[in-house]
């Protein structure tokens, strides 16, 4: 099978979405398929809407199918019919997170909703990374109008060569070692975590923040100002992005994972944390509830509820046996989760079905 993958920017970019894309590409190549990366420069959203980029000229006509990372939707939603007419191949959207459901002003949400609704109608199929994303797609255009689709959840087995402990063994005393892994952007909710920590005893915790600091400079500036204002500089370490080996060591040296995102499409990092026996705290928005079972291997709070988060952190700081039990359950949940090979196999079967159907039509 000859597959095209249309993305913005560099496939090696550090994010869960691009990791998913790389894992899919690797699996397809392992099965003997060829994959051509077609990269478009990432520009402001409004410029993509106003610019009719002739993407059709970039797509080879000898491909069997074209996958579009849904991030490129403003560049292609108008020209997908032309693209299909010129190449004769099916076009599939790969959805990590619908922009309409990310945190933003109301007028942007309306624009994204309208554009993404039109994008879904322009494709021949959808690959969705969670049942939550499938629900959102149905809300955008109606379940009866959805094109053929498949849900293929991400995996978390990103450290296959490491020996992972059977479970966490939290110290019975000392500060609670909390880990946040994610790019420092408003949607990820680091400010909510800092507000929660402010109400706890200063010697009761240590927070490590691992992730890019260059994506939303103004937000990062406000986070640093909040740390100083709340006098948390001795308890919070912002260590920037890490490679795989460094990240594994950081997971191993912590006891609890917290990422209170406003809307996390799925959250590969929650599964990664579970692999190291770390219970996770996420929010009820997005796909975290498909990974975290509240009260069993972690907790779910309402988005923005720093008071509830503070209460949970205080309980886990005081009750290390509870923390250990949650960690044991987290590791068990990880072992039952699909691996990347399962994800790739599900997607490839769906692609082959669309290719075959397209051949019957033509």
Image: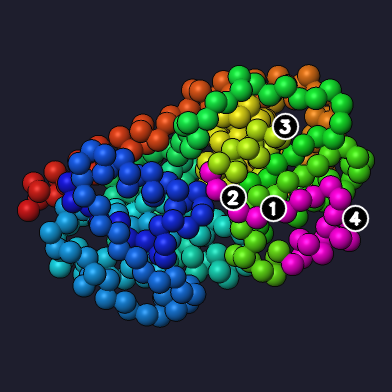
**Residue found 30% across the figure and 34% down from its top:** 345
Image-quadrant location for residue 150: top left
Crowdedness near tag 3: few (<14), some (14–19) or many (≥20) residues, C-alpha within 10 Å: many
* Residue mark closest to the camera, 1 vs 4: 1
* Residue mark closest to the camera, 2 vs 3: 2
Contact? badges 1 and 2 (CB < 8 Å): yes
Give the secondary structure at mark 4.
loop
Q: Return the x and y of residue 261 as percentages of the image width and height.
A: 64, 49
Q: CA distance from mark 1 to mark 4?
A: 18 Å
Give the secondary structure at mark 2.
loop
Q: Return the x and y of residue 276 as percentages of the image width and height.
A: 61, 29
Crowdedness near tag 4: few (<14), some (14–19) or many (≥20) residues, C-alpha within 10 Å: few
Q: Which residues are magenta?
A: 221-244
Contact? badges 1 and 3 (CB < 8 Å): no
Q: Is residue 49 left or right of residue 236?
A: left
Residue at which label 1 appears: 239
Contact? badges 2 and 3 (CB < 8 Å): no
């Amino acid at each position: 099978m000859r597959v095209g993958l249309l993305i913005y920017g560099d496939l090696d970019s550090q994010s869960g979405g691009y990791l998913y894309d790389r894992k899919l590409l690797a699996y397809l190549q392992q099965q003997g398929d060829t994959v051509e990366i077609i990269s478009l420069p990432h520009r402001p959203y409004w410029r993509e809407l106003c610019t009719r980029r002739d993407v059709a000229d970039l797509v080879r006509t000898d491909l069997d199918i074209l996958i579009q990372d849904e991030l490129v939707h403003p560049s292609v939603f108008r020209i997908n019919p032309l693209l299909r007419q010129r190449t004769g191949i099916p076009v599939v959207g790969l959805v990590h997170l619908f922009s309409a459901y990310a945190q933003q002003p109301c007028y942007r949400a309306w624009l994204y909703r309208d554009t993404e609704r039109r994008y879904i109608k322009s494709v021949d199929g959808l690959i969705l990374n969670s049942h939550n994303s499938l629900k959102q797609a149905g809300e955008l255009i109606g379940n009866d109008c959805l094109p053929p689709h498949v849900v293929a959840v991400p995996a978390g087995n990103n450290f296959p060569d490491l020996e992972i402990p059977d479970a966490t063994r939290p110290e019975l005393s000392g500060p609670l070692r909390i880990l946040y892994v994610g790019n420092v952007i408003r949607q990820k909710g680091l400010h909510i975590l800092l507000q929660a920590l402010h109400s706890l005893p200063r010697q009761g915790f240590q927070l490590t923040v691992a992730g890019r600091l260059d994506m939303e400079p103004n937000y990062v500036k406000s986070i640093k100002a909040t740390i100083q204002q709340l006098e948390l500089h001795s308890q919070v370490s912002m260590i920037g992005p890490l490679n795989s080996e460094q990240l594994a060591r950081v997971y191993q040296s912590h006891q609890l994972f917290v990422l209170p995102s406003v809307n996390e499409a799925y959250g590969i990092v929650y599964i990664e944390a579970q692999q190291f026996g770390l219970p996770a705290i996420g929010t009820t928005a997005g796909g975290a509830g498909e990974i975290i079972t509240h009260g069993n291997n972690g907790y779910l709070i309402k988005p923005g509820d720093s008071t509830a988060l503070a209460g949970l952190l205080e309980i886990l700081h005081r009750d290390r046996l509870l923390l250990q039990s949650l960690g044991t359950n987290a590791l068990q949940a990880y072992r039952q989760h699909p691996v990347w090979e399962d994800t790739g196999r599900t997607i490839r079967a769906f692609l082959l079905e669309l290719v075959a159907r397209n051949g019957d039509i033509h």
